[in-house]
Image: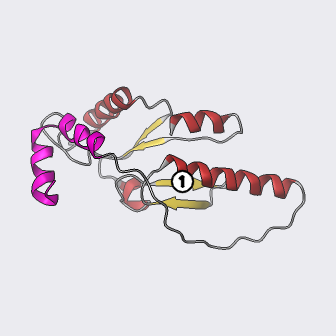
Amino acid sequence: MDDMAGRLAERDVGSVFLYTHEAHPGEHYPHLTSMEQKFRHARELRDVIGVTRPILVDALDGACHRFFGSQPNMTWIFSGKGTPVYKAEWTDAQSVENAMDYFLNVKARREGRETLVAFRVERTDYRTRDVEAFHKGLERDGPKAVREYREAFGG
């Protein structure tokens, strides 16, 4: 996502990472109890996964996360006027890039004086499921996270 954000920045598109909470709290990254702890976890996540985009940190009670749907790894795209134009319940760089290419093309068409009318689309996209990387993330959170995930989902 950061590579794409860099390319899109050249086209005057901003991108941020919203840190909400620990998806699978464990001994190393426990359930968040203070904003100080939340900021520390966000900085560590930035360093561990190499996020280069600005990171915004949600309120301790997760108000922003709840407002935008409470899914664990969502992506939203907003128009320059702040209107939501894309919502994905899971972040997938290829899906997001496809949508951004489309919306930037819409912008160019409007600048060319083409009259466009919005309509809604619903589709299913597909992402690669990297089980190994997911389990490494659980292990980074701690044995409790691994154990609770296995108890809940069997794997």
Percent of width and height locating residue 25: 19, 44
Count of picture labels? 1
Residue at 76 percent of width and 57 percent of height: 106
Query: Residue placed farthest to the right in the image?
Result: 113
Residue at 37 percent of width and 31 percent of height: 49
> Is residue 8 placed above or below 65 in the rendered structure?
above
Q: Is residue 80 visible?
A: no
Of residue 130 and residue 25, the one placed in the foreground of this image is 130
Percent of width and height locating residue 123: 53, 69
Instruction: Give the secondary structure at mark 1.
Output: helix
- Magenta region, main secondary structure: helix
Whether residue 52 sits left or right of residue 26 in the image: it is: right
Whether residue 142 sits left or right of residue 108 in the image: it is: left
Tell me the amino acid under the disc marked 1.
Ser
Report the residue marked by disc 1. 95
> Is residue 7 placed above or below 112 in the rendered structure?
above
The figure's colour scheme reads secondary structure
Whether residue 139 sits left or right of residue 53 in the image: it is: left
Magenta range: 131-155
Q: Is residue 150 magenta?
A: yes
Query: Residue placed farthest to the top in the image?
Result: 47
> Is residue 8 placed above or below 52 in the rendered structure?
below
Percent of width and height locating residue 29: 20, 37
Q: Is residue 83 magenta?
A: no
